[in-house]
Image (cartoon, rainbow, N blue to C red):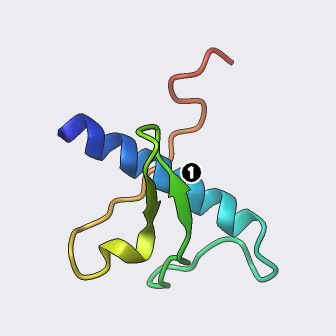
């Protein structure tokens, strides 16, 4: 279960980075700002939306450049 949660968190963080990169306003969130809502298909084939976790669970967004890649 911890591995699945880690995968979801990683996938959500990548989706957040992609969503903010294409935003018309400043793509870098400021400290204290709410993350934009987004939809992401996980490696398990399920769809996840950030808003589904509001008030239910803590969501940690982490990004590791080139993590688990050969390049």
Q: Quadrant of residue 38?
A: bottom right
Nearer to me, 35 or 50: 50
Q: Position of residue 25 (x, y in %)?
A: 77, 83
Whether 13 is drawn above or below 2: the answer is below
Seen from this angle, which residue lies furthest front?
A: 45
**Which residue is denoted by mark 1 in the rendering?**
14
Residue that extends furthest to the top in the rendered view of this protein? 70
Q: Nearer the viewer, residue 32 or 59?
A: 59
Query: Which quarter shows the C terminus?
Result: top right
Q: Position of residue 4 (x, y in %)?
A: 28, 40
How crowded is the residue under tag 1: few (<14 C-alpha within 10 Å), some, or many (20+)?
Answer: some
Q: Secondary structure at mark 1?
A: helix
Report the side of 22 relative to 54 (left or right).
right
Residue located at (21% from left, 69% from top): 57
Q: Name the residue at 43% across, 70% down.
A: 50
As drawn, which residue projects farthest toward the right? 24
Q: Nearer the viewer, residue 1 or 20?
A: 1
Above or below, 64 against 34 in this view is above
Q: Quadrant of residue 23?
A: bottom right
Q: Is residue 61 left or right of residue 21?
A: left
Image location of residue 58, percent across then percent down: 24, 67
Residue drawn at x 62%, y 58% as measured from the top left: 17
Q: Name the residue: 41% across, 77% down.
A: 51
Q: Is residue 47 above or below residue 10?
A: below
Residue 27 x/y as whole percent: 71, 72
Report whether 31 appears left or right of 8.
right
Q: Quadrant of the N terminus?
A: top left
């Amino acid at each position: 279960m911890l591995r699945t949660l880690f995968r979801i968190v990683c996938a959500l963080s990548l989706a957040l980075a992609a969503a903010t990169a294409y935003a018309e306003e400043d793509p870098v969130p400021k400290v204290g700002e709410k993350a934009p809502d987004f939809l992401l298909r996980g490696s398990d084939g399920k769809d996840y939306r950030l808003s589904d976790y509001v008030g239910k669970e803590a969501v940690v967004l982490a990004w590791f450049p080139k993590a688990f890649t050969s390049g």
